[in-house]
Image (spheres, rainbow, N blue to C red):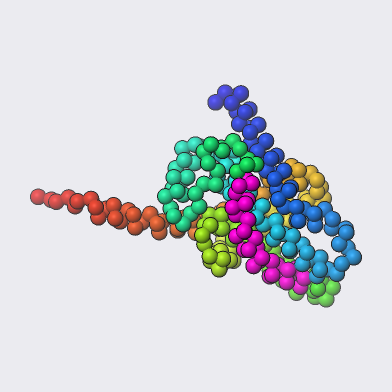
């Protein structure tokens, strides 16, 4: 590949991430506003602040789900992947009923905003409802952690650990929803908690990325909002993807195995003389 072609590919990727940052800046407005105006909530009780933050995080969940779909299917977000590999995977997704078809069409390989907005509108109702389910334990755990901070450090630490684990489970459920759009809410929540526990090393890595994201957002909010959110969620997605991958592989195996069995039965058995 010549230098000009490589330069064009890098330029497309950078522009795609900048456009995705712009989309996330708008779509995650409730969460971004809370993070930018943390000083304005200083007069409120700590449990109230925790509840507001938990609610804002869940209101931003549809934007994160649409970003996960972009990292899953947009060609510019998977620039290092060979076209043949991507085509093979997309054909496999289309042939498996339970798995979502690619959210980006081949004609939109180098587009970002239009398919993102369409995907956001498609996923938003279910992502929001799923996030409301998570908002309740998140708000309770956050408020409990704040309440215990001045009374019992061990109890506060336990509540913070449970809060962090629940946030990762929420992201796992969102990614599972992107992969399996017809799954029931109970199955998505169960997948979030069970596989976040089973794939604990990746859960710890996802948590580390989340902590880094929150710290950078508080230190340099505008830089992160304009240039860093899309890149941070890119690494977060690929970590969460490793947590949900066993479910995806199991679903593909369960649907392909019966088809292979039928194909084998339809082939006449060879006779030996």
137 falls in the magenta region: yes
Residue 96 is at least partly visible in this image: yes
Magenta part of the chain: 116-145
Residue 31 sits above or below residue 6 on the image: below
Residue at 56% x, 54% y: name it.
Answer: 178
x then y, percent, for residue 154: 76, 73
In the shown orientation, is residue 24 left or right of residue 148? left
Residue 97 sits above or below residue 160 on the image: above
x then y, percent, for residue 217: 78, 51
Q: How many marks?
A: 0
Residue at 76% x, 73% y: name it.
Answer: 144
Residue at 78% x, 64% y: name it.
Answer: 52
x then y, percent, for residue 197: 58, 65
143 falls in the magenta region: yes
Q: Which of 122 and 171 is in front in this view?
A: 122
x then y, percent, for residue 1: 54, 26
Q: Which of 101 and 146 is in front in this view?
A: 101
Q: Nearer the viewer, residue 126 or 169?
A: 126
Kindly give the residue lying farthest to the right in the view shown.
Answer: 43
Main structural element of the magenta stretch: helix, strand or loop?
helix
In the shown orientation, is residue 1 left or right of residue 17? left
Residue at 30% x, 56% y: name it.
Answer: 261
Residue 243 is at least partly visible in this image: no
Kindly give the residue lying farthest to the bottom in the view shown.
Answer: 151
């Amino acid at each position: 590949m010549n230098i000009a072609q490589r330069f064009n590919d890098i330029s497309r990727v950078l522009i795609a991430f900048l456009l995705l940052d712009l989309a996330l800046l708008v779509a995650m407005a409730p969460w971004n506003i809370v993070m930018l105006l943390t000083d304005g909530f200083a007069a409120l009780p700590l449990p109230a602040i925790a509840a507001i933050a938990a609610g804002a995080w869940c209101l931003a969940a549809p934007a994160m789900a649409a970003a996960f779909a972009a990292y899953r299917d947009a060609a510019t977000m998977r620039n290092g992947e060979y076209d043949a590999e991507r085509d093979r995977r997309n054909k496999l997704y289309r042939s498996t009923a339970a798995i979502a078809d690619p959210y980006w069409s081949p004609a939109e390989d180098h587009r970002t905003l239009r398919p993102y907005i369409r995907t956001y509108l498609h996923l938003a109702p279910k992502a929001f409802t799923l996030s409301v389910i998570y908002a309740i334990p998140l708000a309770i755990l956050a408020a409990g952690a704040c309440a215990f901070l001045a009374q019992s450090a061990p109890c506060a630490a336990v509540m913070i650990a449970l809060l962090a684990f629940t946030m990762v489970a929420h992201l796992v459920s969102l990614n599972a929803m992107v992969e399996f759009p017809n799954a029931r809410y109970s199955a998505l929540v169960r997948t979030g908690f069970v596989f976040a526990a089973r794939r604990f090393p990746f859960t710890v890595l996802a948590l580390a990325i989340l902590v880094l994201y929150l710290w950078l957002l508080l230190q340099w909010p505008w830089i992160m909002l304009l240039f860093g959110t899309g890149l941070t969620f890119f690494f977060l997605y690929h970590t969460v993807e490793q947590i949900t991958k066993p479910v995806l592989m199991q679903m593909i195996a369960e649907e392909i195995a019966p088809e292979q069995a039928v194909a084998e039965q339809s082939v006449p058995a060879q006779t030996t003389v």
